[in-house]
Amino acid sequence: TSSVELCTEYLNRIEALNPELNAFITVDRDKTLSEARAADARRARGEAGPLTGIPVAHKDIFCAEGWLTTCGSRMLANFVAPYDAHIISRFKAAGMPSLGKTNMDEFAMGSSNETSYFGPVKNPWDPKAVPGGSSGGAAACVAARLAPAATGTDTGGSIRQPAALCNITGLKPTYGVCSRYGMIAFASSLDQAGPMAGSAEDCALLLNVMAGFDSRDSTSLQREKEDYSRDLAQPLKGLKIGLPREFFGEGMAPDVAKAVEAAIAEYKKLGAETIEVSLPNMNLSVPVYYVLAPAEASSNLSRFDGVRYGHRAAEYRDLTDMYEKTRAEGFGAEVKRRILIGTYVLSHGYYDAYYIQAQKLRRLIANDFIEAFKQCDVILGPTAPTTAFDLGAKNADPVQMYLSDIYTIAVNLAGLPGMSLPCGFGGDGRPIGLQLIGNYFAEARMLNVAHQYQ
Ligand code: GLN
């Protein structure tokens, strides 16, 4: 099959199914097909890499030259990026055409894709259910076979939670493995890009493309190039799986608990041992995150002022009025809530009580993982406490929404790699995700553990 044929198949499926699913914000047949023709020409010249010609859908948080790049916000609804994010240039260099830009929660703030200015995405398994978020469009388009693979970003669970809710595989790498250059910033000390696809094997191949040092991101890590698929076939005999006591208490829905228990039994059959570990500060991760992430967001989002790019209010009296009207119109309710919280916790008089305290607790949470990894090779648990909830179910109560990330957020606070893989279905017929957490830079091992289960 040529890349042009493959891309045409996917574009036709997008055209047929996206009006209902709403997984894509922008599709551009001409752009995709011209990239596909270039990939075919490259293959004909014998210059193809392993993924040359395979298309990928990009979360609309990544700047891609000449593409509308909205970040799910009215603020950027007219913003055409003038340059490529590092991740995008890596995919281009690998010869992988873009199928378009996927829907997401506004500025990646959300767990259900319902904060998007472009409307919610439907879960392909059940149109009444949310796909998860913030990379909801990415997860839904892979699950519905509108794309073979997609990029996502994960600040507190935004790759893993939608992957779980849509029955696909998604991986958040160790902080610093993928460059943040050209990825619109939410909470810079937590944001990390990663692959979302149909299997751990596919995620490994995609991570091979995405990972790598980039001098334009000051937190990008300079490491030797590795092949993330190198360990996929390793047997699991002797593997030590850590089960955190705090993951298996109350809070997990009974069908999620049953599915995770079944996965543990399967791993034992594959030769793994389990050991109970403890993450004593786990219960602090959601409150710590909701101090630190809004603090960073309030600073990062100050650049959207109507002056340089994006939305600007049509009428205003003076500069201050222009700022105020632009930001009042451009940002949705959840983004405004985060900016207000962030500004508050950073302000003089509250900084020590909230921001500094949260930074200290973040260190304790990371230390818990460092202790746990002295006793085990990977940590296993659920990705999300329940299967996908109904559209609209948690909109009135932000705290309920925030708690859908209770198992994923600590991983970002610690900077560790984590992934979600399919783990059966609940009584409601909706998918369940299994979460694996690796030690720093143990992506290859984590992918091996996932692949052997799949
Ligand atoms: N749901 C979390 C939030 O709203 C995490 C989002 C993310 O990982 N981008 O902040």
Image (spheres, helix red, strand yellow):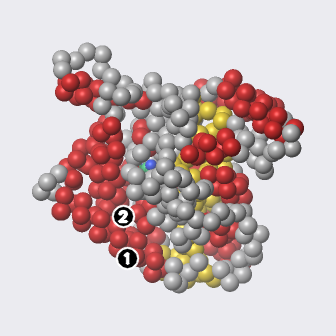
Q: Picture quarter containing residue 25?
A: top right
The residue lying toward the viewer, choosing from 10 and 184, is 184
- 225 sits to left or right of 251: right
Q: Residue at x 51, y 79 (%)?
A: 373
Q: Picture quarter containing residue 116?
A: top left
Percent across and percent down for residue 454 are 72, 62
Percent across and percent down for residue 339 are 28, 43
Q: Secondary structure at mark 1?
A: loop
Q: Residue at x 58, y 46 (%)?
A: 87
| Residue on which disc 1 sits | 280
Q: Residue at x 40, y 57 (%)?
A: 189
Residue 303 seen from this side: yes
Q: Picture quarter containing residue 289?
A: bottom left
Sequence-first tag of 1 and 2: 1
The residue lying toward the viewer, choosing from 120 and 10, is 10
Q: Are marks 1 and 2 in contact (CB under 8 Å)?
A: no
Percent across and percent down for residue 343 are 22, 47
Amino acid carrying label 1: it is Pro
Amino acid carrying label 2: it is Ser
Residue 132 seen from this side: no
73 vs 211: above or below:
above
Name the outermost residue toward the left: 349
194 vs 68: above or below:
below
Name the outermost residue toward the front: 215
Query: Label 1, label 2: how many angstroms apart (C-alpha)?
Result: 11 Å
| Residue on which disc 2 sits | 285
The residue lying toward the viewer, choosing from 217 and 183, is 217
